[in-house]
Image: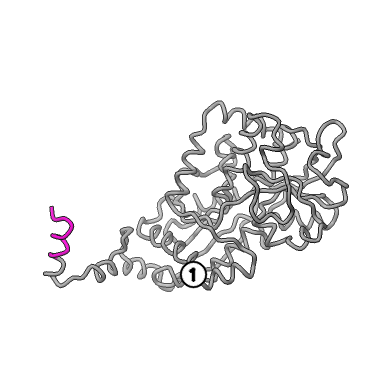
Amino acid sequence: MLRGSCWALVLVLLGVSATSRAAQTDPQGFDEKTVANFYRGKVVRIIVGFSAGGGYDQYSRLIGRHLSKYIPGNPAVVVDNMAGAGSIIAANHTFNAAPKDGTVIGNISGPIILEQLFGNPAIQFNMGKFRYLAVPVSETYVMVVTRKPAVAKFDELLGPNGKPVTVGGIPGSTVEHAPVLVRDLLGANLKMVLGYKGTADVRMAIESGEVEGLFNSYTSLKITSYDRMKSGEWLLLAQLSEKPIKDLIIPNVPTIPQIAKSQEHRQLLKFGTSTPNEFGKVYVVPPGVPADRAMALQKAFQNVFADQELRADALKGKLEIDPMFGEEIHKLVVEFLGMSPDLKNKLQTALKGGKK
């Protein structure tokens, strides 16, 4: 077997430079010409599991404007919305019905992994078998309320005399999981209105007075509701993270260690809300996509997030970019699905009252 300098010498003798060889075959193992021949003239669809106007949609439309130039063959890239059940509908479609040729990318919610973990019969996918492309940024959820319920601090929600607040929920997502845990573990006086297809719909419900707040990622809130938070029209009561968010617009908002009543509650809040959002706004292709096209798409995401035009657009839209890719995401998913039976049972018990 030829190695190192011996192999390099052979290449020189054959008149093949390392650079030209790399141009023919990507270091990740795909032939760019073959992939380009497939994608040329085609359309790549990004299927967003939430309604238009929310954070998922805005990230996907940002990516969609720049991704084509990094996919060999430069196919057109379009964004479609397939909202419902916290992106479970989009995940089912991507895993089962969508073409498995690399022309469909799913943009789904990491927290639906809890629905799979607990055996939700609506789940027709396996999070462990998706091919993971990228996550634009890990997220932290916060609780926001309007001034209508006259609540200024999280503690005012707690106990038998806690002030009531009605929040909107999206099934299968942290927008639902978080208030269930805060209500049933910590004793917060929360009432829930479920069934919304996306946070844009919940925000409309807040405007109409149907609900008085929601749990949402701070990343998304900065995009959609920054002025409301800055003006004090919307108040931040809690952040579901172990450590404070660095750029939080309001100081001294309590974190998980401060609101949890016990170490067990702290652990359940972490695994029920914080950990799944490390891979929250995730981009996937289904199993069965040819390896060379999947590799090409992952490389395209790596390149697009380094694109200076995309980053300038992201800055204008208040979209954070701090991405994870491929195997790093898959490792988190596998570790989560390998949760101990004891913790799984406790978390399932804590979340089972979500429909109350």
Image coordinates of residue 173 in percent, x first then y, are 64, 46
Which of the two residues, 155 or 101, is positioned nearer the viewer here?
A: 155
Image coordinates of residue 211 in percent, x first then y, are 82, 49
Q: Is residue 213 left or right of residue 120?
A: right
Residue drawn at x 85%, y 45% is 151
Q: Is residue 25 left or right of residue 152?
A: left
Residue drawn at x 50%, y 64% is 305
User: For residue 68: magenta?
Assistant: no
Which of the two residues, 309 or 66, is positioned nearer the viewer here?
A: 309
Q: Amino acid at mark 1?
A: Asp
Occupied quadrant, residue 52: bottom right
Image coordinates of residue 313 in percent, x first then y, are 59, 71
Secondary-structure class at tag 1: loop
Task: State which region is magenta.
Answer: 1-10
**Residue 180, relative to residue 287: is it above or below?**
above
Occupied quadrant, residue 74: bottom left
Name the residue carrying label 1.
Answer: 307
Q: Is residue 33 left or right of residue 257?
A: left
Which of the two residues, 78 or 336, is positioned nearer the viewer here?
A: 336
**Quarter that holds the C terminus:** top right
Residue drawn at x 76%, y 50% is 236
Residue drawn at x 26%, y 70% is 19
How does the figure colour the protein chain or chains? one colour
